[in-house]
Amino acid sequence: MIRNLLATSLATALIAMTTPAHAADGNLTIYSGDFDSVAQSQGQSGGPGFALVERELAFDLKPGDNEISFAGLPPALDASSVLLNPGSGTSIRGQRFDFALAGQDELLRRAIGQVVTVEQSVGNERQNFTGTLLSTGNGLTLRLADGRIKVLSSYSSFELPRLPTGVVNAPTMNWAIHADRGGRQSFGLNYATAGLAWRAEYNVNVHGQGKDCRMDLEGAAMVVNRSGADFNDVMLTLVAGEPNRATGGGPEMMVMAAAAPRAKMMMADGAPQAQASGEYHAYRLPTAGSLPQGSVQRLPLVNRIVGAACERRYETAAQFGGWQPPYPIVDAAYGVNDGEEQAVVATLRFKNGKSDGLGLPLPGGRVRMFDGRDFLGETTLGHTPANAEVSLAIGKAFDLGAERKREDFQLDRNGRSMTETIVVTLKNAKPAATTVRVNEALPRWSDWEIVTSSQPYEKRNARAVSFDVAIPAGGEITLRYTVRYRWAADVQVPL
């Protein structure tokens, strides 16, 4: 029995509470991508992770001009994206974002020109000096009341009479709002923030070998919040898609550490249905919940699918890359790795179609594969639409090996052709016969033909063929084939 991955917390435990009777306090839409980067770093504006926040605010206004402040915003927000939508009879005359948090260096920098009291330890004694702060950096420089200048290269603490202008305890948005009438007025607040991300997490349990393979699949969404703020009692939508974003971050802010409040965990009884969201797919949870700062939550994404058709295959291939030359490669030494072993990789393949028990969009994420209790391997799956062919690399096969070498190469410049003979030796230490697919690239030129082959082959694309080679138990088989390349008279060939 496969044990589901439990929801984990990076900083605080998630504590469930009863469902609140009031409406959700806003909407949070998180886009996939950057999960690992977000989970391993503190969120900052322009950093990894992307989410959109919508919420309602209400302020008590007097007739005429009002100065309104709102704190509790994530330090990772994009200040240029903040939009306060006024109601009838109100207008936004100005907007300012104060992000200079009350760290020691920032406090001192902003306190220049103010009277400060500095405590200094000298031996076992402590001395206090009060004066106007002139500079900071390598210690503090004060102008004392009698006009003397005191330079303190080290100090124990300092005291300010008040918080310097522009320094806040938390990122704060300030608005100049004009109201035609007094009273409580509602506004819509929208903004984008970094520091939030999610990815899919799949468990796959396979049964059987070859084309007799069947698999059970279930998927969850792992959601991480490192934005620097809690999102309490929000409706959550997860979007499988990574829209383009302009580069260039906003101002850097220090992340304040704070205890997470008791909050209702994000919950769902089953996977939400995928809905179109522009060019992407969206998954909206049916009930409100909370995403505390520094947490990771696991949520249903794909309900369990049992007995879907699949194929387990062994494959091996030489690594040539995807470069396609503008001329025939006539260098005899090209791609020579004679006698080198190449891995035989176990793969899992299936079609994401309804007839095979699937046929639904699969958001990108990590896939863990098991055979009963045995862990086979894990890999990543890209965003996969319905009816797409899926190939997952499980891992290197222990009892199978392959060795590739070039047996012959002949170049006929006058005949505008060249031939190459390749030998692949396959070994099977398993107690049962096994079939290995040998994938061979034909990289020297686009016009080719297989002249001779010891095994049947199948053309895969314009520059690749494959051979399905059956190997007896405890035995080995040699695959030998010769390919001829030709080119037209007007094609330039390197000397």
Image: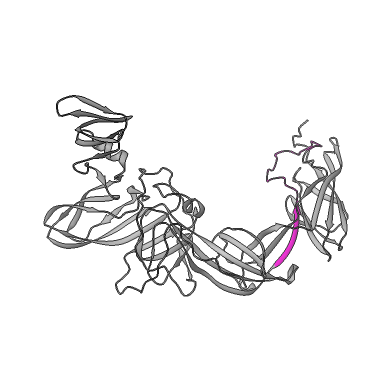
State the residue lying farthest toward the top: 148
Residue at image position (35%, 74%) is 19
Q: Foreground residue, 227 or 415? A: 227
- Say which quarter of the image contains residue 460: bottom right
Image mark count? 0
- Say which quarter of the image contains residue 438: bottom right
With respect to residue 38, does 324 lie above or below?
above
Q: Foreground residue, 222 or 145? A: 145
Left or right: residue 254 compared with residue 366 = left
Residue 169 at x, y percent in the picture: 27, 49
Left or right: residue 400 compared with residue 88 = right
Q: Is residue 211 magenta?
A: no
Quarter of the image where the C terminus is located:
top right
Left or right: residue 49 compared with residue 374 = left
Residue 198 at x, y percent in the picture: 48, 59
Is the stretch drawn in magenta largely helix, strand or loop?
A: loop
Range drawn in magenta:
311-333
Residue 465 at x, y percent in the picture: 77, 54
Left or right: residue 383 compared with residue 247 = right
Residue at image position (72%, 45%) is 320
Residue 285 at x, y percent in the picture: 43, 69
Q: Is residue 324 magenta?
A: yes
State the residue lying farthest toward the front: 124
With respect to residue 29, does 214 lie above or below?
below
| Colour mode of the rendering | one colour
